[in-house]
Image: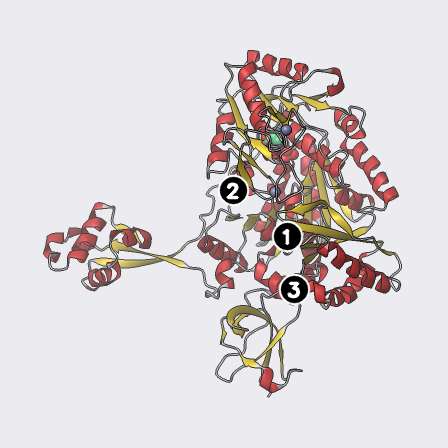
Amino acid sequence: MPKRPTIIKVAMPVPLDRLFDYRLPADLPIPDIGARVSAQFGSRRMTGVVLALAENSELPASKLKNLVAVIDTTAVLPTSLLELLRWTAGYYHYPVGEVLAAALPATLRSGKPAEIETTVSWRLTEPGRGSDPQQLKRAPVQQQLLQQLQESGEILNREQLEELSANWRNAMRGLVDKGLVEELRETVKPKPAGEPVGGPTLNPEQAAAAESINAANGYQAFLLSGVTGSGKTEVYPAAIDRQLAAGKQVLMLVPEIGLTPQLVARLQQRIAQPVLALHSGLSDGQRHNAWLQAATGEPLVVLGTRSAIFTPLPRLGLVIVDEEHDRSFKQQDGFRYHARDIAVMRASRERVPVVLGSATPSLESMHNVASGNYSLLDLTIRAGGAQLPRIGLIDMKQHSVHDGLSPPLVTAIGERLDRGEQSLLFLNRRGYAPVIMCRDCGWIQHCPRCDAHMIMHRQKNLSRCHHCGSETPLPTACPGCESTNLKPVGEGTERVEQALAKLFPAARIDRIDRDTTARKGALEQKLKAIHDHQVDIVVGTQMLSKGHDFPMITLVGVLNADQGLYGVDFRGPEHLIQQVMQVSGRAGRAEHEGEVLIQTWHPQHPVFQALMTHDYGQFVEAALHERQAAGFPPYTNFVLLRAESTAPVKALAFLDQVAKIGTGLAAQYKGVQIFDAISAPMEKRAGRYRAQLLVSANGRGLLHQLLNHWLPRIENLPDARKVRWSVDVDPVDMY
Ligand code: ADP
Ligand code: ZN
Ligand code: ZN
């Protein structure tokens, strides 16, 4: 007989990248690998995940603690997912215990049983329906509940009962004993969407794309590209159906579900099996049940945002990442993973096809097509017969501009109003004005905690920093010269909205940005108003560029198109063209021809030339050449080490030490380059001074080997505990 393992190696949710040994007391069952256990860590009791069983530990027996409890005897994390998570922890150099914890829903993290929760409700029995509450005079709570049940349609659930009486449990037991009420237990499962509705007949390109995906045998990566409106979203159901029919599960990632309610509804309509939408609006209980339902392996679709990539799907058949270029797939703090990249890795490990879809694919994915890693499925015509919008450039050097609006744009808006059509103005800056300046001495209001200007919010009558959230009342006088001659410089959405109201007093104008949509349901309401044509002009930020169809919008104006063109971020031009193309795609989708007017100071810039001809491919080709010449991703791999400290210089000095150690090690790793530590582009943010250190390599293998040597040395530096530092593999933001 094999010996009973006595040592359990556990990944604990703590920032230390190692496993912890615990003794398995004789009275506890042997857990599977991937099961949860409860263990004492320092002064706290925590939930960890079993990663190995052993007969002995390297630690002396006296140092070992007993496990407190075995929560699951079988794994909550299926082997394939557990292995993926371990790979992910290694790739992003993030502690494995924290990675595993991030993959679990909050309920399972806190140790709740891994069982689908049943809701309990109470229903009147036949005798209960006919019984007179007056007979229960001596049990007033029972009387009250019986009366309520009779009045309220015979069923009450726990929440309703809580509101009726604090003593409902005892009273309800009494009613059940008397045979007047019975208990109902049911599993809350999202209802299957009902009879699926057929979509349009696919055009030959769409059909060919779906066929290629369905013909994939094992792992294959596809890039499904095509201008907005070319019908990418219709290809997905065709591929999904095939998998579900074969009893498989499908994982589909989208940037933000709140912004794409149309997509969720469309998918739910098309598909007979359950579509589990995983997003931030779910309660812990809903997430818990959805996660466990997916884990059963029944055929269904998980449609979720970034973190849904870690949903257990034992019968995974297909992975889809819609809008794969979107930056929100990359987590920007803590565990800095990229859900799209993990999606490709997951598909490859589980030998299933993966489809990345976008009208404006990332340069990374385009490079993967060029190098033969991904197969391109290109949709070249707009489905449903719609034309691509006409694109015009407005050279800002030629015009005098008021409140951010050039005369040709104002004229174009007026024409739309006359014709009863809608206009959309896109401006990636909220607030009234980005700068408040003294006209007499040139003083500018800065954030006291950041290297940034305070943004004027006129309606709320305050200045606010968009980096740390600091607020002050709007200054009434200059602190330098006491002049009251203060002037807002530049414009945000609020100012443009006001200017439009003055120019077009009869027009119905609405604004969509984070300030106007903070309240739950506000965004949906506003989007509906646009659809119902209760709005003539919409001013908004990038929230508008995602996934909505507005058939009556025939004019899109892009106000501050140059933002990011000459900034510190080498991906600036890529993001700019993606945003403008996405927002342009909102125009003229139906029978109405659309026009896009772009205001720019640099009309000759290649980005705008590519936009004029709708030639994303032309932009990609030029941009990839530039990246290659400069030694930037996707031709090299970047890792960014960041540090921050409340004291100036400390973070930079720390990274200097880090760089020194790294340079010493790098001699063995040809093709790895360690740059000098520098202050971050915005050095001070939220009261902390920040620095960064860039590492670039010609191959991932060597880079990760170096990091595996380097990071433990960094952890051991005495200063490592005096600053906050982090590792960002494949950084998306270079700040
Ligand atoms: P994308 O996702 O590429 O932006 P959509 O899938 O949203 O494009 O399609 C754009 C519009 O064209 C939608 O209104 C859609 O219903 C319609 N459409 C898509 N495919 C077809 C088709 N084969 N026949 C008719 N209409 C279609
Ligand atoms: Zn002044
Ligand atoms: Zn600030």
Q: Amino acid at mark 3?
A: Pro
- The residue that mark 1 highlights is 333
> Distance of mark 1 from mark 3, alpha carbons?
14 Å
> Distance of mark 3 from mark 2, alpha carbons?
37 Å
Marks 3 & 2, CB-CB < 8 Å contact: no
Q: Residues within 10 Å of mark 1 (few under 14, many from 20)?
A: few
Q: 308 and 498: which one is in front?
A: 498
- The residue that mark 2 highlights is 268
- The residue that mark 3 highlights is 95
Q: Position of residue 373 (x, y in %)?
A: 79, 49
Mark with earlier residue (1, 3): 3
Q: Secondary structure at mark 3?
A: loop
Identified at 21% across, 49% down, the residue is: 148
Q: Is residue 202 visible?
A: no
Q: Residues within 10 Å of mark 3 (few under 14, many from 20)?
A: many
Q: Is residue 12 visible?
A: yes
Q: Secondary structure at mark 1?
A: loop
Q: Amino acid at mark 1?
A: Asp
Mark with earlier residue (3, 2): 3
